[in-house]
Amino acid sequence: MAELGAALGGPARAAAAGPAPLVKPQVGRDEWILRLGLVVIGGYLLIALALPLMVMLSKSFQRREEFVGLANYVQYFSTPSLFASIQNSFSVAIVSTLITVPLAFLYAYALTRSAMPGKGLFKTIALIPILMPSLLPGIGLVYLFGNQGLIKGLLFGHKIYGPIGIVMAEVFFTFPHAMLILLTALSLADARLYEAAVSLRAKPARIFRTVTLPGVRYGLISATFVVFTMVITDFGAPKVIGGQYNVLATDVYKQVIGQQNFEMGATVSVLLLLPAVLAFLVDQVAQRRQVALLSARAVPLVPAPARRFDLIMLACCSAIGVYLVAIVAVSQFAAVVKFFPYNLALTLSHYDFDRLGVGGWKSYGNSIHLALYTAVIGTGVVFVGAYLVEKGRGFRLGRQVFQFLAMVPLAVPGMVLGLAYIFFFNDPRNPLSGLYRTMPILVINTIAHFYTVGHLTGITALKQMDPEFETVSASLRQPVYKVFGRVTVPVCLPAILDTAIYMFVNAMTTVSGVVFLWGPNTELASITVLDLDDAGQTASAAAMAMMIIYTNLGARVLHIALARWLERRTQAWRRR
Amino acid sequence: MVSGPAVTSPREGRAPYLRIEQLSKQFGAFIALRDISLEVFEGEFVCFLGPSGCGKTTLLRAIAGLDIQTRGRVVQAGRDVSALPPGRRDFGIVFQSYALFPNLTVARNVAYGLENRRMGKAETARRVQELLALVGLPEQGPKYPAQLSGGQQQRVALARALATSPKLLLLDEPLSALDAKVRVYLRHEIRELQRRLGVTTIMVTHDQEEALTMADRIVVMNQGVIEQVGSPLDIYRQPASAFVAEFIGTMNFLSGRMVAAGAAQVGEVELAVEAEGVPVGRDVTLAIRPEDISVDRPAAAGGNVLEATVDTVSFLGAFYRVDVVCDRADKARLHVDIAAERVHHLGLAVGQRRTIGLPTEHVRVYPPSRVHG
């Protein structure tokens, strides 16, 4: 038993004469490519996001290029007319949230937990507001409840112009976003929990309280903060229907466009940024928790028909659906009649935008251009960026910084970003200042503004890919761009298409992001809606807004057709 | 159990194909590998075997350049590849997940590594066909991976890894995702293929049966160090440490103390053991396999005879596992494996008192250890 001594001394080991030297791994070609990509797209995010925001922050501490500390903030809080806006913004945001989230919950609950008919139709109707600028609900509400409104009697003498109108418009505008979040949360239910509750003889109210609500609590938190953020940062609705009721977003606009007081604009922007960032952080935490609730072995819940309950749900959804449809329908109707509501003769004269001395049809063309550029370039940039973060190896710090930058846009209101661009790109010392008021800057801004959602979509899709694809490809001595082009992109194509349509639709509808950035040759359709409404050409404003909706609708239909075709073509290799 | 390939020694007089020298890997404060040295010879089939978290996959990934070691060298075919990225090393790899490209057909998966190699279309197609035939899937080229069974997918992954004729094949738990029958069949298939191609192969597994049946040599790892390197027979018959003894197969352990040269005391019983150089008075752990304990002819056990009570008798198919309690040896409980016919012949029954023998040559001596409590 020769090895016994060694056995008693523990496992055999090589006699080491001190530790071996540290290994410094060589960085291969593939990794250089990945790092270079990360630096290039990271550089874009730095220029399009981080630097402008930093400049803006510093401007809020300046007056005429002089550092004045907190003087702007002191002035802001000591000017009652400005200070009142904070209170207004919060009131409107809180009330809108308190109305929207329960309605959206009811709607999503009906779609997931009842056996009512017409679910497909109701789901489609709920998504309509996503296709339009936030200016349109204001216009529609004016037609319904304004001075000449069809049903203004329902307000019992209250004026639609002001907080009531803003809240009604925001409920309309934010409804689909809250509904989608809650729909996802509710559809993740595990039928086994309900079976267990029923077998323990729990009453429906108790089941709702102990099973349903806990299951969607993070969805509710998320929906609450998303709606709150959207309302507090929205510019379109208060601009159209707010009347004399000032909110933070309209203050920024007035300070900059009306009074040319850029520093005060920056100050208000920072104040607008704070609640948005706070809401963003809370939402991040909530979403992380929601994921943890997911169980791979959950059994999907299939609602059983219950006549009374289904009818109640149908009635609730119909009421909400009528509200959503009415606002769009009345806008469309007003756009094609001579003078709503007095002369209802049909006419296309409101579509003769060129006669009205604004951007006209050209601005519609510009919007299409912007949307296409944003969809194509933006989707490419965002997806490659997500790939570099998710599949890169080493260079941890670089990837973490990138990931952080990619999340920032979700917390930054469009108007704040737009104002930051003025400071950054309109500075003659900036070599990029030639871009100001051109199409490229609109594209750069819009991609940055909507970066996060595309990034997260990409990351989610990439996480579902086998992490060893890259390894296998490298062991077969193929460059990383080959596995990216041959495997990653084809497999992720549905997610890439989703990102593209998201970018397109948002580029068509955005107002707040671009309101400071367009020039004489680059006016956009959404800006034209704003201008026409400002000029009292409400019917034409409605007409242009409807053009945006139809364009987005067309894009959606095209997207669905493409996605179906893709699914058919690739079903041979897609796993069930 | 010990039906693995005969102990070959392909290493005599030859330089190793792969040499690992003093390799360590740290993840932050966690030390995943500690000063590992190992040589693998050309054409050898080596298994890294150990419980999860023992560092076997980390070692494989260091060899591939996927997670390069913190310290130490990897020398492949005389070339120091320690710091090279995976793309500049020479290996093919198969993962537990297969990592087949889902959107490419089987043929295109296999051809993936052959592209950009100045190989004509016809030549590539011929090579792909050859490889698919090699793994027994000559007709499956036009299908997509999702249309194949798990075992078939595994073989496609193998064909893809072999397409570029690598000199080193790395298999990372290649059979773990398959069901038991396919797994047993593929063990044989992979081993046959490897022998035919003569490609040096390293396989990571946590399945001892897999390692025992497939490997020329097994590297048993635990907590970032190599516990033992040896042929399957060596590892099974002469485990170098209590950990190896516990991890491979079933082992009985007894706590004792050396009371004289070649004699250990367990409870009131004195047992003859082969333990040269272990000083008298030292605590030791004695180990013996269940099939080495004799029940019918205890006298042949060289004097190590104990009285024991039969406690349970479990039928396990080809044999019975009989648990006996040795009253005078600290009430130690021992597993004894006895062929089914012998049990009937002996008329073993619960509650009987029997004399059992622990043959000296089968009793192994280790330092006192925690493994058996």
Image: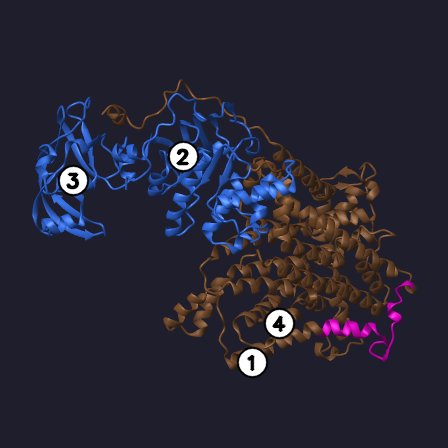
Instruction: Spot the blue chain and give its letter.
Output: B
Quarter containing the N terminus of chain A:
top left
Kindly identify which residue carries mark 4. A120
Q: From the top left corner, tell me how far across and down residue A77 is, in percent.
A: 70, 51
Report the Cα–Cα distance between label 3 and label 2: 32 Å
> Do circles 1 and 2 both sit on a common chain?
no
Span highlighted in magenta in the image: A326-354
Q: Nearer the viewer, mark 2 or mark 4?
A: 2
Q: Nearer the viewer, mark 1 or mark 3?
A: 3
> Do circles 1 and 4 both sit on a common chain?
yes
Instruction: Spot the brown chain and give its letter.
Output: A
- Residue at image position (61%, 68%) is A99
Q: Nearer the viewer, residue A447 or B332?
A: B332
Q: Earlier in the sequence, mark 3 or mark 2?
A: 2
- Residue at image position (43%, 42%) is B190
Q: From the top left corner, tell me how far across and down residue A427 is, in percent.
A: 81, 40
**Which label sits on residue B293?**
3
Query: Magenta stretch containing residue B139, yes or no?
Result: no
Q: Nearer the viewer, mark 4 or mark 3?
A: 3
Whether residue A81 is visible? no
Q: Nearer the viewer, mark 1 or mark 4?
A: 4
Tell whether label 3 touches label 1 (CB within 8 Å): no
**At label 1, which amino acid type do we have?**
Leu
Kindly identify which residue carries mark 2. B45
Q: Residues within 10 Å of mark 3 (few under 14, many from 20)?
A: many
- Describe the element under mark 3 as helix, strand or loop: loop
**Which label sits on residue A311?**
1
Decide if residue A472 is on the left or right side of residue A273. left
Query: Magenta stretch containing residue A334, yes or no?
Result: yes
Q: Residues within 10 Å of mark 1 (few under 14, many from 20)?
A: some
- Describe the element under mark 4 as helix, strand or loop: helix
Q: Nearer the viewer, mark 1 or mark 2?
A: 2
